[in-house]
Image (tube, coloured by chain):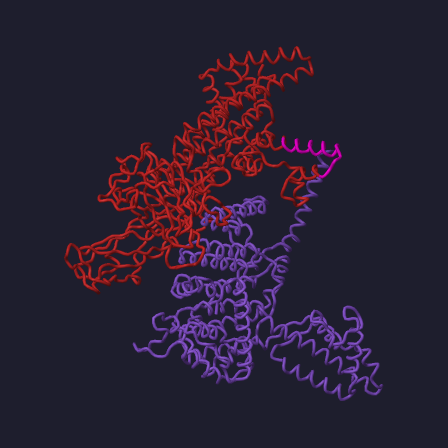
Chain colours: A red, B purple
Amino acid sequence: MIVENQLAIPFLQWLPDALLAFVAVISVLLVLGSMVGFLSVAFRQGPTEAVYAVANVLFKAVPDVMATSPRRTFALAKIAFYEAMRNKVLVAVLIFLLVMLFGSWFLDSKNDSPVVLYISVVFGATTYLIFLLSLFLSVFSLPNDIKNKTIYTIVTKPVRPLEIILGRVLGFGAIGSLFLVLVMFVSYAFVQRGLTHEHQINVDSIEEITAQNPIIQNGEVIAQIGDTIGYRGKTTEDAHHSHKFEIYLEEGKGSAQTDFKSDHYHTVSLTVPDDGIVTADSFTISPPQGMFRSRVPVYASRIDFLGRNGERSVDNTGKSVGIFVGKEWMYHSYIEGGSEMAAVWTFKDLSPESFEETLPLELNLSVFRLSKGDMSRGIAGEIYFRKPSSSLQVKSEESVRVPFIVKEFEIQSLAVPRELGGLDIQGNPTENKIDVLKDLVNDKGEVELWLQCTDTRQYLGAARASIYVRTPDSSYFLNFVKAYIGLWIQMVLVVAFGVFFSTFLNGPISMLTTLLSIIIGSFKEHIFLIATSGREDNQLSVGPIEAALRVLTQTDSKGLDLIAADTTNPLLVYGLSALQWIDYFVVLALRAFSNLFPDFSQLNFSNSLTAGYNINFYNQLLPQLLTAFGFVLVTSLVSYFFLKTKEIAK
Amino acid sequence: MKNKAFSRNKIIYLVVIVALIFPLSMLGMPATGTGENRVASGMLASIRDEHGLGTANLGKVDPSGASMQLAMLGMKNVAAHILWSKALHYGKTEQFDKVSATVKQIVALHPYFFKVWDFEAHNLSYNISAQFDDVEVRYHWLKKGTSFMMEGFEYNANQSRFPKTIARHVGSKIDKADEKIQYRQYFRDDKAFHDELDRMVEIDSSRGIDQKPHHWLVSRLWSKQMVDLLDSGKAHIETQTPVLVYSAPAKAYSYYSKRSEESGHFDAYIKNAWKRTERDWVEFASRSFPTLRGGVVKIEDLVVYQDQQALANERLTELVPGVREKLYEERLTEILAEPPFNGLSEAEMPPVLIPEYEMAKRRARVLDEEVFLARIPEEHRAEAKMLIRRSLDLSSKVFSINQDIASANYLFFREEYTVEQQESALKARELFYKAKIAANNVVFRGYVENGVQVDGAKELFEKGFAEWDKVEFINPVAGYELIGDEIQLYWGILAELEIQFPEKLFETEGLQLRYQEIYEGTIRRALEDNERNNDNGNNIN
């Protein structure tokens, strides 16, 4: 399974742009707020008074905000927490339990990826419940207090508006957190329990594996033709699947992994009894393995593609790409088999101390067959390592080729020995073996991994995340917790927005606007794509008027420009120009608008969990935490000003 | 006072409510019991049962699906739309397991729409299956789509398009895909899938020559289910073509017999298989099919109608000799006087107008009843009118039957089962089978029997053609089509051996005529290619 957001930008690379954007947003909001305030006062009392009023608010706000007391804030948070508890919101936990109990009714029991299914269900259910919980808590609290006039019991005390806002955000956030913690444990148990199963051996399927040729070990013939050297068979069917296995014996014992099905495998062990009669009882099958993984991949810093002529192949934006085979989803780029085409990954700073004897690679490649070829066999590829030179076309030392057969749609493990045969710059074999992590690393600590397809008329598809070096797994439970932190961030954002809208709108309306914010946040990428037509340089796309015109005229090129070129009437020319400007500002506004809301899709880490990849705290979670903090800060500050303008807060 | 009125109103409402309860319960009382013990108690339940309108009449009712629909609060169509978009997105991004899971959710919301099941089943079996490189995995997804459709049939037990689609998945897809060799083998050995199919069709009756279920026989069972459903009146044929629907079981048997032969069996079993095929086709030919004019016809009555029509025309000619021909000439002259002919005669007709001229002749032959009758003496007019009407009616029936025959390709299949049962044909097939094995023997290009090298492929083919010559055909031209592939393979062998293709291969006139046609066409094309290549500077002999 491919997880597209695995390649997150490193934190330190993300931070400067993020800070800049944050400062820009704060500045824009400040200016906009001041202008709105100025205009609203100016209409009533004139511009001079307006300037004075705006300055007064701004200058008073700074010390007011700075004097926010954590003690009072926490006290208000406690009140909000108890208020929520009194409203029995934790009934939502009960609802979640019910969903988990009866959830199996709706699950596709025969699905080939039960882990994906179960994780999707628990995350889906949790997301909907937590959104509803935080929505209802946050949007009705302040408006109800204002309506019931219970707000006066708070504002008559020496509390600041920001403390009221932050208190509610923290209080409701705490309730949501408690809910999430409870739900997280229930979900984990549900997933673990739901996927547990066991197989027995299918007695009728047991077959002997006999030697086709004499087997010689250490100069001694250990098996003649026809001798039994192992057993193959199938397990019984459980959870709508069964496994195949092949065990080769050594001194009457052996064990092997079954095939990988439904996201897992089992280890089957065989001990041949003294009487030599193998029965089902001679085998033992382990519980499912490999189902709950948290891989920690080390990705290449870049990927390049070489064309048929051996030169680096690029598209019109300068990005290195392979061949386009016509697939709608252009995640993979393809290299042609039996040609000079290659995909080159450049790994940086692979520490020799971390990989003693082998370099554990994992591959997730795609295959495109131009002809059927031999359908009983997969497509063959080969990898080798090379020392980076001044350019990809310049020859340098490299290792021998390591051939393999590509397995599509599954993560394929390839343990490459660190020491391999080598080839010098002329392509002649070296006398001694070379150490990939020492002899092929350049001054910058880089080493190249080359992939080529060896079957002519076939293609292999690759992307940067298609090959990586695997380091020891991290804890699955910890990964599960990190995925729930993503949900927690979403909950906090919903609470922040809910409280923000409730400072100037009544309960039902603020609920609708908060719901709308969630929807916009969930489709933010889609909205952004509309604004930029999915262009990688993120330049603005054509606007609605231009788009409508193109649909009507069925033309691919600029419709308004074409019409303008065909006319000499100055009124029409200016009119068309005005339409283009309107279009431009509409699209600009759409793009800016999409940036006002958090991207909820980036906060959904269930894909990483189901695919078995570790969620990197520094590169994936921390940026999201800081972004959420930014949103909470901005919404709280804006809420502060809204609350201050209401009479109750004066 | 106010309280009294209020209390009075309350009592009136209460009385009305109680009074309404009785008719409501009569109308809305649900049915009790299931299956044969089902009793439709209320009026609405009875009407539903009578017209097959209840949800339970459609098929299985799924409580989880019903709960999901309830939980959608009336927005199930919105949810289905979103899920469908998601399924397409997952398909595009190759997350096929999510496609499968999402599709299950869609059908939980819309279990009674055929197109939902059909689209997704096709997606699983044809589109997603083709994405995988491993043939075994492709087969697995093919089965997934088929199982999905079977599940749909449980919910829609009275829709004939479900078994039809399942028959196509199991029959055509397995038999004709690029991976057919592997698929056919996997299907034969797939006990788990056989057990799954056994829930709905009797798998034991679909065992082939190796005692394992054969995909075409299983397909036939599904086609029979479809036919039985239609015959029982529970299902409607809707927009499907009747001839194609009802010929499906017979075609499946034809394909089964053919495949069994291709796997190297030429004994009494195969002869019986073709006999069984014949029975299916005879049954098909005896079935009534509707015509466009509202009547029904049977394919088996074609010859009878043709004979009756000939008799009617004969009698008409006897009655009023020459009138018809005269009318034809007059009509043709009229048509030729108009554009685009503008008075041209047949001899003067330019080649570009020949097709239109043929059309004009057909138009001229159409009998205008009134004009014809006006030319006939009074005493014969009544009989002539009756004969004309009869002839037209029979002509329309013959036309309908010929259309049905063409749609079902009945003549080809009839020729096939008639021919393949004969001893000479079986011998010929055995020789062709050996010839193909010989042709694949790259070392020797010959057939090896008991370790001894015997005839080469060329000799085996020629012996096979000689046996084929002894066969009795209904239509020798159709008989030629049955060995068209073998002729091509034979020519391939000759080309390799650099031997000229023989001009005469058969003694039977019809076979030889058709062979001659193909032969001349092939030679002509080869000469044209050679000329073209000469012009381009390449010379291929």
Q: Quadrant of the N terminus of chain A?
A: top left
Classify A350 as above or below A53.
below
Residue lying at 54% horizontally and 64% vertically, measured from the top left: B535
Q: Is residue B504 above or below residue A306?
A: below
For the point 49% across and 46% down, the residue is A329
Q: Position of residue B248 (x, y in %)?
A: 54, 69
Highlighted range, magenta: A566-584
Residue A572, magenta (yes or no): yes
Query: x%, y% of residue A522?
Result: 52, 36
The rendered magenta stretch, by its main secondary structure, is classed as helix
| Residue A614 place in picture, x, y as percent | 37, 37
Q: Is B146 contained in the magenta span?
A: no
Tell me if A86 is positioned left or right of A292 in this view.
right
Report whether A558 appears left or right of B72: right
Is A503 situated left or right of A341 in this image? right
Q: How many marks?
A: 0
Image quadrant where residue B208 sits: bottom left
Can residue A143 be seen at all in this image of the molecule?
Answer: yes
Q: Quadrant of residue A353?
A: top left
* B243 vs A117, nearest the viewer: B243
Residue B509 percent across, percent down from the top left: 55, 84
Nearest the viewer among B432 and B282 is: B432
Give the camera-side residue of A314 and B111. Answer: A314
Q: Residue furthest bottom?
A: B318
Of the 4 image quadrants, the one containing the C terminus of chain A is top right
